[in-house]
Image (tube, rainbow, N blue to C red):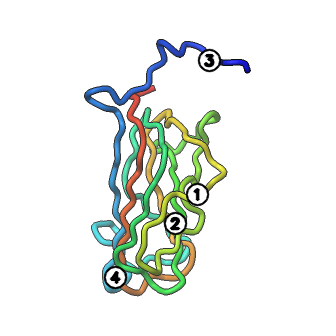
């Protein structure tokens, strides 16, 4: 039986030492009883295909996973897409923007917890700051709802 070792195994940076580089960032999408996005510049209910920028993921973050927690269900049949797009609006050839990096159709019409379920992606390190972006896929929101997203990653510093 052969034994193999990865190159530079003794000097590879693994992070997470006594100070730690593992990080969890929390973002919230909440609507009022009229379906308007709370704490935003929105004045009308969130409609199908509307996009909401939830916050900024820092440059150099290696994105590992996401947990979506729906604590107050949105309008019946509601789903959303969750991904990222760069703050400067310019795509990157090595790490392209991805509108559904975490979820292509997360059901937000019932309470629950869901791990990122887009299985076609691998962890990426953001070369620059990116917005965490949710897109309301289906119904126009007509009631109060709340979903929190916990993005798990490793902060490696600016690339």
Q: Secondary structure at mark 3?
A: loop
Q: Quadrant of residue 59?
A: top left
Give the x, y percent position of residue 20: 31, 32
Q: Quickly name the residue at label 2.
A: 135
- Say whether marks 2 and 4 touch (CB < 8 Å): no
First of labels 3, 2 by sequence position: 3
- Residue 5's tag is 3
How far, Cα to Cα, is label 2 from label 4?
17 Å
- For image coordinates 28% across by 67% down, the residue present is 39
Q: Quadrant of the N terminus?
A: top right
- For image coordinates 43% across by 37% down, the residue present is 61
First of labels 2, 4 by sequence position: 2
How far, Cα to Cα, is label 1 from label 3?
34 Å
- Say whether marks 3 and 4 touch (CB < 8 Å): no
- Say whether marks 1 and 3 touch (CB < 8 Å): no
Label count reads 4
Q: Quickly name the residue at label 1.
A: 100
**Apparent side of residue 18 relative to residue 129 in the rendered image (left or right):** left
First of labels 4, 1 by sequence position: 1
Give the x, y percent position of residue 93: 64, 35
Q: Secondary structure at mark 2?
A: strand
Instruction: Tell me the crowding category of disc 1: few under 14, some 14 to 19, or many 20 or more residues within 10 angstroms, Cα based.
Output: many
Residue 77 in the image: above or below residue 121:
below
First of labels 1, 3 by sequence position: 3
Instruction: Tell me the crowding category of disc 4: few under 14, some 14 to 19, or many 20 or more residues within 10 angstroms, Cα based.
Output: some
First of labels 3, 4 by sequence position: 3
Give the x, y percent position of residue 13: 44, 20
């Amino acid at each position: 039986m052969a034994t193999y070792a990865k190159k530079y195994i003794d000097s590879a940076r693994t992070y997470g030492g006594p100070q730690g580089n593992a990080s969890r960032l929390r973002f919230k999408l909440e609507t009022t009883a009229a379906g308007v996005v709370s704490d935003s510049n929105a004045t009308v209910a969130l409609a199908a295909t509307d996009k909401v920028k939830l916050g900024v993921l820092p440059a150099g973050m290696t994105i590992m996973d996401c947990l979506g927690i729906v604590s107050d269900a949105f309008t019946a049949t509601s789903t959303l897409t969750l991904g990222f797009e760069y703050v400067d609006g310019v795509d990157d050839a090595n790490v392209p923007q991805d509108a559904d990096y975490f979820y292509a159709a997360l059901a937000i019409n019932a309470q629950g917890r869901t791990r990122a379920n887009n299985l076609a992606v691998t962890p990426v390190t953001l070369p620059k700051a990116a917005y965490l972006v949710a897109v309301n896929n289906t119904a126009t929101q007509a009631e109060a709802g709340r979903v929190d997203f916990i993005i798990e990653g490793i902060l490696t510093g600016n690339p």
